[in-house]
Amino acid sequence: GELLRNSITIRKAGDELDGLPGNVEADTVAHCGPSLKGEFCRTLTVVDFATGWTENASARNNAYRNLSKAEAVIEERLPFAIRSYDNDNGSEFINLDFISHLQAIDVEQTRSRPYRKNDQATVESRNNHIVRRHAFYYRYEPAELDLLNELWELVRIKANLFTPSKKPVGRASTRDGRPKRVYDQPVTPWERLKRFDDEDRAKGGPGFIKPGCFASMFVRQVRQCFSVVWADGFPRCRH
């Protein structure tokens, strides 16, 4: 408990990261509906801070032997390697098995301050915009676990390949002197990741995208489909 928690470094909302892919935040969402009684599914959300790439996987509860399966699915799906892992103070993350797993794959683990949700603002926003938006506040029991995981397989394609988003890049002032946030142009998480990968490879680095990752193959197949369609003269417009 307390000794394990104190052994993990705290990362606050204002702490700066290196701005490269691989620094992720993680949290779980309880699909309990209106009652906490009985057993219900949990969804693990992992989001990359630099690109916004988000993965979800559900487990029958927060026990390590179940949540570790969801974690393994997410680690396999991510198109880049995890370098640091920031979580809250829940027992599903602060336990010897989970800590040992991250150490075994050479990932630095940090945690937020207790009761400070702003320390994990990125993943908290995904809990709302992705998990609650698609699975709602319904109750999902273990018999419906496969249904939830089928949902996340579809949502990940939409969220990471086809949903542009803005990221704050600085601050400025309005004409009357009020501070305001400055955002970049909206792009998808995949486009952000490709930029980081291309820049690193141009500098002689290994890049960030894993060889044979799902996103690369999916985008390639979509482009091939559209090239065939356009080659056949589609769409045909009336003149």
Image (cartoon, rainbow, N blue to C red):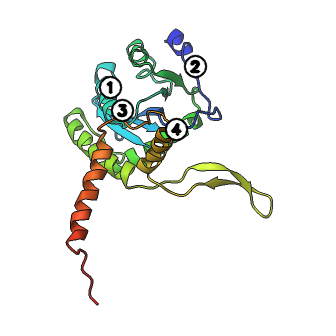
Label 3 Cα crowd, 10 Å radius (few <14 / some 14-19 / many 20+): few
Residue nearest the observer in this picture, 90 or 182: 182
Furthest-bottom residue in this view = 239
Residue nearest the observer in this picture, 27 or 76: 76
**Left or right relative to 222: residue 22:** right
Q: Is residue 52 visible?
A: no
Say which quarter of the image contains residue 103: top left
Pick whichever of labels 3 and 2 is earlier in the sequence.
2
Residue to which mark 2 is pinned: 9
Report, in whole angstroms, how far the alpha carbon at label 3 lies from the one at label 4.
Answer: 52 Å
Report, in whole angstroms, how far the alpha carbon at label 3 lies from the one at label 1.
Answer: 18 Å
- Mark 3 touches mark 2? (CB < 8 Å): no
Residue nearest the observer in this picture, 135 or 50: 50
Say if 196 sits above or below 66 in the image: below
Say if 145 sits above or below 233 in the image: above
Residue to which mark 3 is pinned: 36
Kind of element beneath mark 1: helix
Of badges 1 and 4, the one in the foreground is 4
Report, in whole angstroms, how far the alpha carbon at label 2 lies from the one at label 1.
Answer: 22 Å
Kind of element beneath mark 2: strand
**Left or right relative to 52: residue 44:** left
- Mark 2 touches mark 4? (CB < 8 Å): no
Q: Position of residue 38 (x, y in %)?
A: 29, 29
Residue at 80 percent of width and 58 percent of height: 177
At label 3, the amino acid type is Leu
Residue to which mark 4 is pinned: 203
Report, in whole angstroms, how far the alpha carbon at label 3 lies from the one at label 2.
Answer: 31 Å
Pick whichever of labels 3 and 4 is earlier in the sequence.
3
Residue to which mark 1 is pinned: 67
Residue at 25 percent of width and 69 percent of height: 230
